[in-house]
Image (cartoon, rainbow, N blue to C red):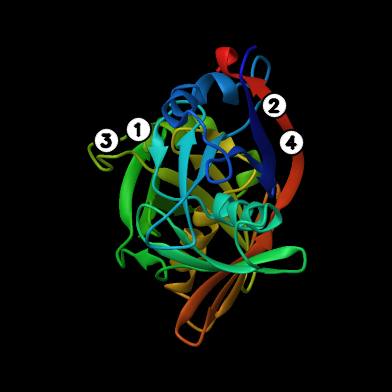
Amino acid sequence: MNKKIKFYKMHGLGNDYIYFDCISEKLPIEKIIQSTIQVSKRHTGIGSDGIVLILPSDKADIKMRMFNSIDGKEAEMCGNAVRCVSYLANKLNITKEAMTVETIPGIISSEIIEENVKVKMFYPPKVQDQEMPISSCDKNFDFNYVDVGNPHAVIRAENIDKLEIEKYGKPIENNTNTFPNKTNVEFYEEISKGILKMRVWERGSGETMACGTGACATAGAYRLKNKECNEITVKMLGGDLQLLWQDNNFYMIGPAKFVFAGEIYLENL
């Protein structure tokens, strides 16, 4: 009989991934990783922005690994996925409501609070103080480089609803002279004090409905010039995230939504 593998579909503000529980069940991890691009396809696969593995950890309660839908490459970190991993691990009785999650850049603490997950990031956004110029197609931009465990180029712009994000975001993502490992690209505008609207071109995935680390990076770049803002709301296509500086810690607060569970045949991966 063909072997079926269970998966879980979840999203954080529309940023959707396929989750595999590699703790409760013995799964063919390498085979799943190799199938990332195929399984992530919207029309011929399950459909997602990528896959996420929940694994045992000798440093934290659980470990998270994630892979991008378009290029299949492993990403260091994803804020939306951390919230979903935390929510799912608790629902599967792997962890309690408060837990630690091992990621490539460090260990993150998270806590489920009603419909939201509050994540204490391992460090505040590391923002390059000086804006740097970069050109893309027929436009010149200024960006702040921000490290939140993965790379981000944060650009303040106008009328981002009308921005041709693939036209301008994709060349910046792939500008390996400036970003040797490529980069995520965020375009944002200020709606009012502490309220930002953002669109994201994610490295290896294209435009997504939301990006948790992108929201953190954008808030960090914005706060560089607005140091009195200890609470910032970032509004994305999929919804809002709250970023909070409190007691020398940096938090990301937002929802994690379970969509459905299913099974896929191993031979189809």
Residue that carries the numbered disc 4 in the rendered image: 261
Q: Amino acid at mark 1?
A: Asn
Q: Is residue 230 above or below residue 147?
A: below
Residue 144: image location, x then y, percent: 37, 58
Residue that carries the numbered disc 2 in the rendered image: 263
The secondary element bearing badge 3 is classed as loop
Query: In the rendered structure, which disc, 4 or 3, sits on the residue that comes first in sequence?
Result: 3
Q: Amino acid at mark 3?
A: Thr
The secondary element bearing badge 4 is classed as strand
The alpha-carbon separation of the residues under discs 1 and 3 comes to 6 Å
Q: Are marks 1 and 3 in contact (CB under 8 Å)?
A: yes
Q: Amino acid at mark 2?
A: Glu
Residue pictured at 57% horizontal, 36% vertical:
207
Q: Nearer the viewer, residue 182 or 121?
A: 121
Marking on residue 176: 3
The alpha-carbon separation of the residues under discs 3 and 2 comes to 38 Å
Q: Could you classify mark 1 by the number of other residues whose Cα lies within 10 Å: few (under 14), some (14-19), or many (20 or more)? A: some
The secondary element bearing badge 1 is classed as loop
Quarter of the image with the N terminus is top right
Q: Are marks 2 and 1 in contact (CB under 8 Å)?
A: no
Q: Are marks 2 and 4 in contact (CB under 8 Å)?
A: no
Residue pictured at 62% horizontal, 54% vertical:
89
Marking on residue 219: none
Residue that carries the numbered disc 1 in the rendered image: 174
Q: Is residue 110 above or below residue 64?
A: below
Q: Are marks 3 and 2 in contact (CB under 8 Å)?
A: no
The alpha-carbon separation of the residues under discs 4 and 1 comes to 34 Å
Left or right: 263 in relation to 123 = right
Q: Amino acid at mark 4?
A: Ala
